[in-house]
Image (tube, coloured by chain):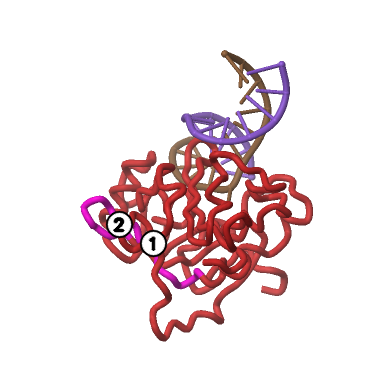
Chain colours: A red, B brown, C purple
Amino acid sequence: MSAPADVLGPSLLGCTLVRRLDDGTRLAGVIVETEAYLGAQDRAAHSFGNRRTDRTEPMFGPGGMVYVYLSYGVHRCMNVAASTEGDPQAVLIRALEPTENVELMIRSRMARSSARSPASLPEHRLCSGPGRLCQALAIELEHSGLMLDPDGPLHIEARPPGWSDETSIVRSGRIGLGEVGEWKHRELRFFLSTSRAVSGGRVVPADG
DNA sequence: ATGACGATTTACT
DNA sequence: GTAAATCGTCATA
């Protein structure tokens, strides 16, 4: 977790994000899409220019600290702080392939969105976006500032032994940014080309 | 105290 | 493809 964000981002693909509910129930999915935010120099990062506030404080924490923020007044997005304490880099988790307690995740999504029927939430769309996965795993603002911890509400498990999807990792420009100059086009989004659960535009750099 | 602004999702045309 | 929803955060006063 102390790797820089552009290294941590792709290395989280294939790992499993686990949400442990108060009663011990596990909601989980394999990470298939991430984005790196490089900190003080990155015009697209909340921590650009070392902007340090109550909200962005977790980005300044040690690698493995969770940063959750509210997007568009509607959605939560979860990040994991990268690098070391004081260097505000982070990796945004953008999509998962649901694996554990999927029925419960569907119910969690319905309770937190205007979705009316499970039919509108097929497995490959359940967690295919940063806001969606937070709905499915019941990730809230109150989780911001926690450390990833196997005994806590959130943690990340290593790739299974023999994981061999390294070759299907693809990169592209980040999604949904405003006017941030060159930073808009730097390839800091990482996803598995083999996954159907990645969000929105499956934009691959020229030739594909 | 107030006003502007989103690292998005959904429904509808 | 377009548009609306919706509120915490941040800057300014």
Q: Residue at x 46, y 72 (%)?
A: A14
The answer to which image quadrant residue A149 occupies is bottom left
Q: Which residue reaches farthest right?
A: A181
Judged left or right of residue A179, residue A143 is left
Residue under the point 63% across and 66% down: A6
Q: Which residue is mark 1?
A: A155
Rendered location of residue A106, percent (x, y): 31, 52
Give the mark, 1 or 2, whose residue is nearer the N terminus: 2
Q: Are marks 1 and 2 in contact (CB under 8 Å)?
A: yes
Find residue A207 and report its horizontal and vertical position in percent.
Answer: 71, 74
Where are the magenta residues, as a range?
A: A12-27
Residue placed at 60% from the left, 70% from the top? A7
The answer to whether residue A8 is above or below residue A167 is above
Instruction: Return the residue found at the far bottom.
Output: A162
Q: Is residue A14 magenta?
A: yes
On screen, residue A166 above or below A23: below
In the picture, measured across the screen, residue A98 lies left or right of residue A6, that is left
Using the image, name the chain to which the residue with label 1 belongs.
A
Where residue B3 appears, as percent x and y from the top left, is 65, 20
User: How far apart are the two marked residues, 1 and 2, measured between alpha carbons?
Assistant: 8 Å
SS class, disc 2: strand
Q: Which mark is residue A20?
A: 2
Q: In the structure shown, which secondary structural element does the residue marked by tag 1 occupy?
A: strand
